[in-house]
Amino acid sequence: MHAPQFDDDRDQVIDRARAAGVGLMINICDRVSNFDAVYAIADANPDIWATVGTHPHEARENPDLTAASLLELAQNEGRRDWGVRSRLSL
């Protein structure tokens, strides 16, 4: 939902999903650099949750990414839910 190709009709896409009976949506964070955009959508819509993480194909952007840094993002005040979509070396 946060991707640029939805900029022109994001609200309409969300409205159509609701009209079709979708009661909960999860906006997947595919890159840590996108987390603010992912979270902003969730923050504005109580029926949209955000995840925090990075897709393994994008892991090279953050070679020092740790589980602790993802948890820190996820646990900031106001975050409703979180998930990790990555293979991490711990």
Image (cartoon, rainbow, N blue to C red):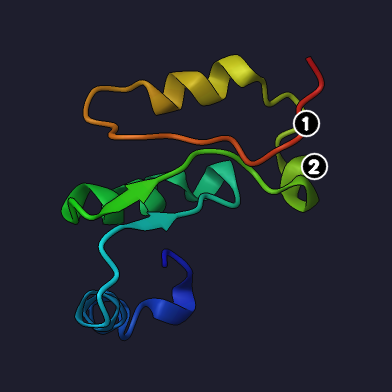
Instruction: Work out whether 58 lies above or below 86.
Output: below
Give the residue at mark 2: 60
Residue appearing at x 73%, y 50% in the figure: 58
Residue appearing at x 69%, y 48% in the figure: 55
Q: Decide: marks 1, 2 in contact (CB < 8 A)? A: yes
Q: Secondary structure at mark 2?
A: helix
Instruction: Work out whether 44 lies above or below 68.
Output: below
Residue appearing at x 60%, y 48% in the figure: 31
Instruction: Where is residue 25? Give x, y as percent.
Output: 35, 59
Instruction: Pick the residue in front: 29 or 49.
Output: 49
Left or right relative to 84: residue 80: left
Instruction: Where is residue 86? Give x, y as percent.
Output: 70, 38
Residue appearing at x 22%, y 74% in the figure: 18
Instruction: Pick the residue in front: 21 or 56.
Output: 21
Instruction: Give the Cα distance between marks 1 and 2.
Output: 5 Å
Left or right relative to 51: residue 13: left
Instruction: Work out whether 71 lies above or below 28.
Output: above
Density class for disc 2 (Cα within 10 Å; few <14, some 14-19, many ≥20) is few
Q: Secondary structure at mark 1?
A: loop
Question: Label 2 sits on what residue type?
Answer: Arg
Instruction: Where is residue 64? Give x, y as percent.
Output: 73, 24
Point out the image quarter for the N terminus: bottom left
The label on residue 63 is: 1
Quarter location, residue 69: top right
Left or right relative to 81: residue 85: right
Instruction: Where is residue 90? Give x, y as percent.
Output: 78, 14
Question: Label 1 sits on what residue type?
Answer: Pro
